[in-house]
Image (spheres, helix red, strand yellow):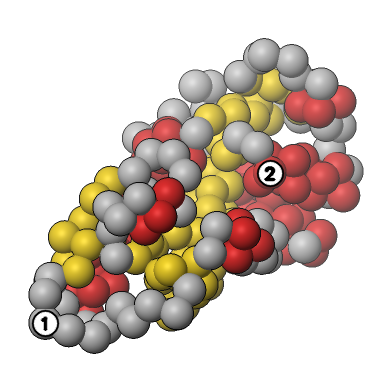
Amino acid sequence: MQNNVIRIALTKGRLEKKATELFGKMGFDTSLLSDRGRQLIARIPGRNTEVVVAKPPDVLTFVEHGVCDIGIVGKDTIIECGGEYFEVLDLGFGKCRFSLAVKKGEEFYGGYGVKTVATKYPNVTRNFFGSKGMDVDIVKIEGSVELAPLLDLADGIVDLVETGSTLRENGLEEIEEIAQISARLIVNTVSMKLKKQNLDEIISRIEENL
């Protein structure tokens, strides 16, 4: 990567759309980003800035390894995956929450047996129950985690919840909130020193337009 180019990693999907709107407010020409088709790297016209669109864990990897200077990614991915970078701003969009949910009317914390919990986020789940001094069996699910209690695969689930409508439609209910989630701005630790002036300018403009 050229030393004067700032490369920003964006999370595909909703956060990409919100971030593109934010860049537009900042006065960036987002035409190539908004209409990128299948291109995964888009240039911001008139600026030494490139945008890379990737899956959430890859955003962390690209920023940690310095191939991207800045990343926009959900706090859920940061908590689950960890890594070495600076988390500099809560961007305030992409809001949701980690919650523990069970079949409606069922008691999760009763009894003496080890509970089984299905989730896409095993580290978050392990740390949450560890903080309570509880041992749980964790089943990793890649798709619709709501299916696990319905199929009697698990006693409960840990998942991201926005409105709760998917849970309700499937006969589940939240019984405990684990953490509030939103999009965060992360910065590579070396870039923060080597490209400080350019990055400070971008971070300030982001703050002004939130």
Number of marks:
2
Residue drawn at the location 72% of the way across and 22% of the way down: 43
Which numbered mark, 2 or 1, is in the foreground of this view? 1
Residue drawn at x 38%, y 39% is 142
Characterize the local packing of mark 2: few (<14), some (14-19) or many (20 or more) Cα atoms within 10 angstroms. few
The residue where tag 2 is placed is 14
In-front residue for pair 167/150: 150
Residue type at numbered disc 1 = Tyr
Q: Is residue 138 above or below residue 10?
A: below
Q: Position of residue 182 (x, y in %)?
A: 59, 62
User: Which quadrant would the C terminus be assigned to in this image?
Assistant: bottom right
In percent of width and height, residue 191 lies at: 46, 43
Q: Which residue corresponds to the image point at 50% horizontal and 59% vertical from the top-left?
A: 160
Q: Position of residue 153 (x, y in %)?
A: 27, 52
Residue type pointed to by label 2: Arg
Q: Which mark is residue 129?
A: none
Q: SS for tag 1?
A: loop
53 is higher (above) or lower (below) than 182: above
In the image, residue 143 sits, relative to residue 95, either above or below, namely: above
